[in-house]
Image: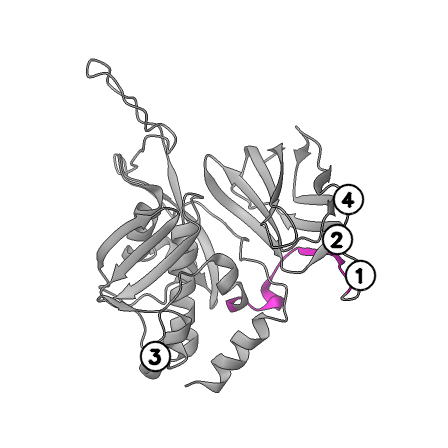
């Protein structure tokens, strides 16, 4: 068991972390005729046999590494394939030659194959032929590979958690700490947000934390967004301001375009009152984007959600 890894996982309970979102870029290059297209994820309705569906361009967000930090990039997705599975296939292919010249890398071993993929509700079950061995390759390499898989599969918004297996055997945080007999729970983005060091994060997020001796909230629960307003034009940084009237938390802030999550922040604290976040806009992002702010339900507070549509000016 790695003492360093146990210390890091323990620190997760004390830290308010966010996911890596900076530097999302287009794939290095695409040769003529190589760019694939996909029908929109929401367009699964039955189509009459006489009508030929028109596929629309689509992308998946794939998490590689750059200077030993997770860095998302874009990939074309195949016609008819799900975004999550297509993104995972692109991840296993590794960075393009152009991306490697820009120092993009991966912790996924060369030659790793996807043995099986299926979804159980909003949980994906992924079985790979190989992932780093914590004993031979080190804890850091194993954690980065796990981060890449979970963040890539959940980037499209249709999957919330991932159960990872290697050749049919569970592979997760328990396995990495030397306790493979424990049933591995599915992993969410929040479970692995600690992998990226706080010093690597751009932007910030915080809230008014509920005091331990505070009286339970007795009013009508509400999540109010004060900023931005609908239709606001965003250039470099999105400033989110709001107020949570409940004993809720954490607060999850997501930017979604065409069904794909392109950036997020997680305020992993019991909030009550004002909250704020500053989110740098990925350089390749442009056009309308949906801002989704939510807090999951707890024993003492209901689930709440607020949405806005903003316009990203683009580079």
User: Residue 199 magenta-drawn?
Assistant: yes
What residue is shown with label 1?
A: 214
Q: Residue at x 32, y 52 (%)?
A: 88
Give the Cα distance between marks 3 and 2. 43 Å
Query: Of marks 1 and 3, which one's residue comes earlier in the chain?
Result: 3
Query: Of marks 4 and 2, which one's residue comes earlier in the chain?
Result: 4
Q: Residue at x 51, y 42 (%)?
A: 284
Query: Of marks 1 and 2, which one's residue comes earlier in the chain?
Result: 1
Q: Which residues are magenta?
A: 195-211
Q: Where residue 131 appears, x then y in whole percent?
A: 30, 69
Q: Where residue 315 appears, x then y in whole percent?
A: 58, 39
What residue is shown with label 2?
A: 272
**Please, what secondary structure does the residue beneath circle 3 have?**
helix
Query: Of marks 3 and 2, which one's residue comes earlier in the chain?
Result: 3
Q: Where residue 16 appears, x then y in whole percent?
A: 63, 64
Q: Relative to residue 162, is residue 19 drawn left or right?
A: right
Binning the other alpha carbons within 10 Å of mark 1 as few (below 14), some (14 to 19) or many (20 upward) gives: few
Q: Where residue 154 appears, x then y in whole percent?
A: 42, 50
Binning the other alpha carbons within 10 Å of mark 3 as few (below 14), some (14 to 19) or many (20 upward) gives: few
């Amino acid at each position: 068991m790695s003492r360093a890894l146990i210390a890091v996982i323990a620190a997760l309970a004390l830290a308010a972390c966010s996911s890596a979102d900076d530097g999302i870029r287009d794939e290095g290059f695409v040769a003529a005729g190589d760019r694939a297209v996909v029908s929109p994820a929401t367009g699964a309705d039955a189509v009459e046999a006489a009508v030929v569906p028109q596929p629309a361009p689509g992308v998946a967000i794939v998490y590689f590494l750059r200077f030993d930090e997770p860095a998302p990039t874009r990939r074309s997705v195949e016609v008819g394939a799900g975004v999550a599975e297509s993104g995972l296939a692109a991840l296993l292919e590794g960075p393009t030659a152009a991306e490697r010249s820009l120092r993009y890398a991966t912790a996924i071993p060369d030659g790793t194959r996807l043995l099986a993929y299926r979804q159980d509700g909003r949980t994906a079950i992924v079985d790979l032929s190989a992932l780093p061995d914590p004993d031979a390759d080190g804890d850091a390499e194993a954690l980065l590979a796990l981060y890449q898989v979970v963040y890539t599969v959940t980037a499209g918004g249709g999957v919330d958690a991932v159960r990872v297996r290697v050749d049919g055997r569970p592979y997760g945080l328990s396995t990495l700490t030397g306790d493979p007999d424990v049933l591995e729970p599915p992993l969410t983005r929040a479970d692995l947000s600690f992998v990226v060091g706080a010093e690597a994060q751009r932007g910030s997020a915080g809230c008014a934390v509920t005091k331990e001796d505070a009286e339970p909230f007795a009013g009508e629960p509400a999540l109010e967004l004060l900023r931005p307003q609908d239709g606001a034009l965003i250039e470099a940084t999105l400033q989110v301001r709001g107020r949570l009237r409940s004993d809720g938390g954490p607060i999850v802030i997501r930017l979604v375009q065409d069904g794909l999550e392109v950036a997020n922040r997680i305020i992993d604290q019991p909030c009550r009152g004002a909250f704020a976040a500053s989110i740098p806009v990925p350089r390749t992002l442009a056009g309308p984007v949906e801002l989704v702010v939510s807090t999951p339900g707890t024993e003492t507070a209901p689930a709440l959600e607020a949405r806005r549509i903003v316009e990203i000016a683009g580079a």
